[in-house]
Amino acid sequence: MTRQELIHEIRRKQSFLCIGLDPELEKIPEHLKSLEDPLFEFNKRIIDATSDIAVAYKPNTAFYEVLGAKGWESLEKTIRYIPKNCFIIADAKRGDIGNTATAYATAFFESLPCDAVTVAPYMGQDSVQPFLAFPGKWAIVLGLTSNKGAHDFQYLSDVSGKTLFAQVMAKVATWGTTENLMFVVGATQSEQLLKIRSIIPDHFLLVPGIGAQGGSLDQVVNAGMTKSCGLLVNASRSIIYAGKGLDFEAAAKKEALKLQSEMALHLQRFMQ
């Protein structure tokens, strides 16, 4: 999906909602657990209920890989089921180099029809560049995360006072364009978004942490939204686990609609 196609869907749906498809067997509704592929059936019903609201879906590969070959089969079926007008993010956090990085990119962009892969930039340009070599595909690079350990490295400053995360984002931005490169910025780091926007004013940001993790949509929008929206805000647990009964997908849709209605108001203020 190109940048313009993504922006078109944001305008059409009046939404910049990304839903994280992170199912855990012990947390999905009981009536699904006896089915042949409970993870796929859970995801399928979430997608059916929300695909008119969400512009993106983000399956985290860890929740499938933990189940071995069967889990990978569920992941592939899920990815292929997502409608083509939705942006598909493989949240795999790959970070290797050379032909290994190329193999990872090929796996998600050719063997699977993903639009984007999350990538860790620690090994430098040759760990990101292979993901930028596929037309119409995206690398989503870890920029500033919201976990406690982010302070171990990401906030370290050089002698001029420039933080490591700011240096990384400025450098990575030179490797690609606003057409194939996004950054992950945790929603609970909204106080840093103005600084980040001064470094990368036009790149899209994938912002996890709204909902169960306590991030504020208003704060993220006010600091990070651009005239092209520039945001994909992700919610996972607050939506997919909103209900546990036979109608769990209806509860998921209700939660998604709450976010979408707020997003529509923000889009009316910012987008031209």
Image: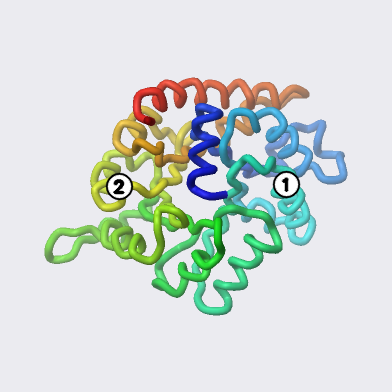
Residue at image coords 54%, 43%: 5
* Pick the front one: 82 or 156: 82
The label nearer to you, 1 versus 2, is 2
Q: Tell me the residue that label 1 is attached to.
A: 78
Whether the residues at callouts 1 and 2 have beta carbons within 8 Å, the answer is no
Residue at image coords 40%, 53%: 178
Apparent side of residue 214 relative to residue 13 in the rendered image (left or right): left
Residue 156 in the image, given as x and y percentages of width and height: 24, 60
Identify the mark nearer the N-term, 1 or 2.
1
* Other residues around mark 1 within 10 Å, as few (<14) / some (14–19) / many (≥20): some
Q: Find the distance from the CA under tag 1 to the CA under tag 2.
A: 33 Å
Give amino acid for label 2. Answer: Pro
In the image, residue 76 sits, relative to residue 25, either above or below, namely: below
Q: Tell me the residue that label 2 is attached to.
A: 201
Badge 2 marks a residue whose secondary structure is loop
Apparent side of residue 124 relative to residue 5 in the rendered image (left or right): left
Q: Quadrant of residue 160?
A: bottom left
In the image, residue 138 sits, relative to residue 233, either above or below, namely: below
